[in-house]
Each structure stands twice: as C-alpha cells, then as structure tokens.
Image (cartoon, rainbow, N blue to C red):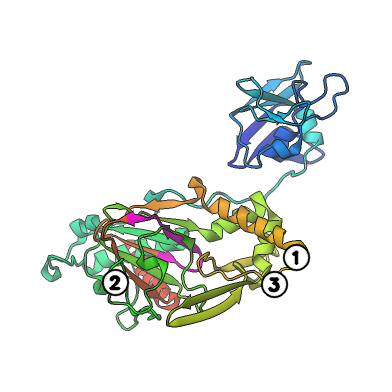
Amino acid sequence: MAVRVELKPDWARIVFSEAVDGITSADFHYFWLRHNCPCLNGCRHQTTHERLIDASVIPLNIQPLRVETTTTDSDEPAVTVFWAPIATKNNTGELELPREKEHASVFSVDWLRNNAYATNREQTHDLPPHDANLVTIDYQELADNYGDTANSTLTNTKLTADGAARYKALLFDKLSQYGVAVIRNRGSDTEDIIYDFIDPSADVIPTHFGRIEHLRTDNTENANNDQLGYTNSPVRLHTDLCYAESVPGFQFLHCIRPADVGGDNYFVHAESAANYLKTEVSRRAYDLLTTVPVRFDRKQNKFQALHVSPILRLGDTPDPATNEHRLEQVRYSYFTQGAQTSVPFSELREWYEALQVWDKLLYRDDFQIKANLEAGDVVIYDNLKVLHARNGFTGARHMAGVYLNSSDLWPHLRQAKEQTVTTEA
C-alpha cells in the first residue's frame, strides 16, 4: 500500500492510499517514532527483538533529519525516518553517543497502521503567525497614494478620507486575523495616532502610570515608574495589567527613539499558541493552565493590585460545533505572578511542568513575530490574545505606550472596513 508523508513541526502524518477499517491517515509524534524504532542496531536486541532503548534518553522535541517512503528487507512498503544520533545507555548504564552519522528507523506501512493511535484527526491547529510581513502596513506608501497635502505638516502626514478608510480597513484586517499590526513610517505625533484606532469622541484608558506611558530609562513624566518597562532590561513575553479586574483590550507602542543597540520587540499570538498546545502538544497542560488559578500581584512603592485567574481563561458557553469552550483571555505575566499556593503538594510539579511546556512553546522561533521599530513606527496588539516582549538594550530608547478599549476600537475600524467594501463593490 502506497503512502504519503506530511511532516508537521512536531509530528508526522501518514496518509494511506487505501482506507483499511476506515483509516485514511494516522498521526505520529516524532518522539514516539524514535522510541519505537525497530532496528537491531541498538534499539532492539538482535536475538530476542526486545526493546533496548530507554524512553528517558529521547528528547521530547526530537526532529527527524528527513523522511522517505521506502521498502523493508522483505519488500513491504515502508516509511524510513532518519535521525541525528542520540546518546543511549551502555552496559554500565552510562550515556554514550554512537559513532553513526545518522540513525535510520524503518517502519512497515502495515505496522504503522496497526499501531496507529491518532487516526483521521480533524481538529488540529497550525503554528501561530510568525511572518512579520503579514502584519506590516507601510503608512508612507498610503501617504504617497492618498496623501492630504493641504492638511499635512512636517511631523504629521494626513490621508484623504478615502486613504484613511483604506488604512483603517487594513488595520481591521490585520488585527482581526493576527491580533497585531506593525505600522511603518506613521509619524511623530502620538496624540494624533491615537485616533487612527478610535473615534475622536472616545479616549484612551488611563492607568496608574498615567494617560500615556513614556517607556524610557530617564522617565520623569509617569507615576509609579518603578517597574521593568522603565529599565533597559529585557522584558519577556507577557500581557499587560494582569492584576487588574478589567484589562485593556488593546495597547499600542509608538517608537519615539529606538535603542542604540537591542530593544527589538517580539510578539506571540497566544490564542493560536494555546490551541496548538491543546491539540498538538499536551491536552493535560492546556487543561491545567485553563483551570488552576494564579495570583497576579502588582506591588510597587505607591501602588498595589491583585487579581486571581487561570493563565488561560475560557468562555462560559461551549462552541456548538466542537463542544469546546473557546479561549477568551490570556493573562500571562511572569513579573507579577505571585507565589503558587492553590495547588496540592503532590500536584504542584505537574502544574509547573505544564507551565514550562507552555513557556517553551512561546519561545520557539516559529511561534514569534519579530519587529525592530524605528522612529515613527507603531505597533498595536490585542492585549487579551497577544503576548509582547522586548530585548534588553543600550541607549536612550523611548516608546510611548497607550491603552485602548476594544469597544472603542472595533466599531471604529469596522466602519472603515465596511466603507471600503461598499466603495469597491
């Protein structure tokens, strides 16, 4: 029976040319395939064919070098997976790296079908978006085509009504699909930029930092600036204001001045990451992160706030199509995460393991959108569904940060989207 192999980031799909007992495809984790290697060259005993390889030596993130459709020694259709060598235990129990350049695991197609544990899977999820080009808008390009020269200044380029509607329709599309938009060459007027996203009758969300945060090491504008954002240290992936009862739906950062070295921003679409965790990596970890409460405790010299919530908060009503509760909000902030005291002693390790699985996913390159902001650039992101971070830096980096209500942003951008659809119809 012929097969087709589809390689995914963390597993392989074997598609059978003919259905047997209703099985048309089967999915296999790479670590499972490596553990079940049938070779007699260290994985199985040459006489008894019993397993020799210890599961503890197989990295759970193992990846194949390549996969080929082949045949077995008896000319049965097979799938051969080639691996980099891994250290195995020798006769004295010590780890020893074999001398082979690569290791081949030859699985007969019949064996794979008979031992399939995930057949005809339909509910799978792709990686989060990680191409910065997908989320980028060049404001200068819009200005070149739709510039309102009569109302523009040297520091603030205005668009015509048609151009503004097209710009906001692009914002609507990027934020709806990816949760983040990077706007290049937007300009230097933070106050004017606010109304790219909301109606002039609305306003920003002031916080205990102030109306607009000026994130720089020599900050004198904002209150309560005794926190990481006002230092030059790296700030790892997080959502903002996890300790607040009501969290701002959106934040934008306006680059006033980039760092001399470093300070690049990166983002992860956490909703997509959570779905990937659930169906592709560890349902158990997902269940723990959606149910175990976490204390988010902001303690500063002149401010304190506390909120308790799971990292992944699900909605109350299940999706009729899947009977799964949809993810409504991600609260994730390592620097305001309080001591975990709600988990029994015998279960705490399991919760930490779930947290580590989640964290390691987020820091994979194929999960992140990376953006180096220059002066005049803006990035806006969904604070309920997108994690943001920055690298450490040197120099006088200056970002202006502004929080917005989702209930102000979406109607404003949707109106522009509908206007452009009507115009182009």
Q: Amino acid at mark 1?
A: Phe
Which numbered marker is on residue 284? none
First of labels 3, 2 by sequence position: 2
Residue type at mark 3? Answer: Ser
Q: Are marks 2 and 1 in contact (CB under 8 Å)?
A: no
Q: Is residue 238 left or right of residue 139?
A: right
Asked if one can make out residue 263 in the rendered structure from this viewpoint, the answer is no
Circle 3 Cα neighbour tier, 10 Å, few/some/many (<14 / 14–19 / ≥20): few
Q: Position of residue 297 (x, y in %)?
A: 54, 75
Secondary element type, mark 2: loop
- The x and y percentages for residue 183 are 31, 59
Helix, strand or loop at mark 1? helix
Mark 3–mark 2 CB contact (< 8 Å): no
Q: Quadrant of residue 283?
A: bottom right
Q: Is residue 115 visible?
A: yes
Location of mark 1 (residue): 345
User: Left of 394 or right of it: where is 27?
Assistant: right
The numbered mark, 2 or 1, whose residue comes first in the sequence reads 2
- On residue 342, which mark appears? 3
Mark sitting on residue 219? 2
Does the magenta stretch mainly form a helix, a strand or a loop? strand
At a point 25% along the width and 62% down the height, the residue shown is 186
Q: Quadrant of the N terminus?
A: top right
186 within the magenta span: no
Give the magenta range: 381-393
> In which quadrant will I find the C terminus?
bottom left
Q: How many marks?
A: 3
| Label 3 close to label 1 by CB (< 8 Å) | no
**417 sits to left or right of 104:** left
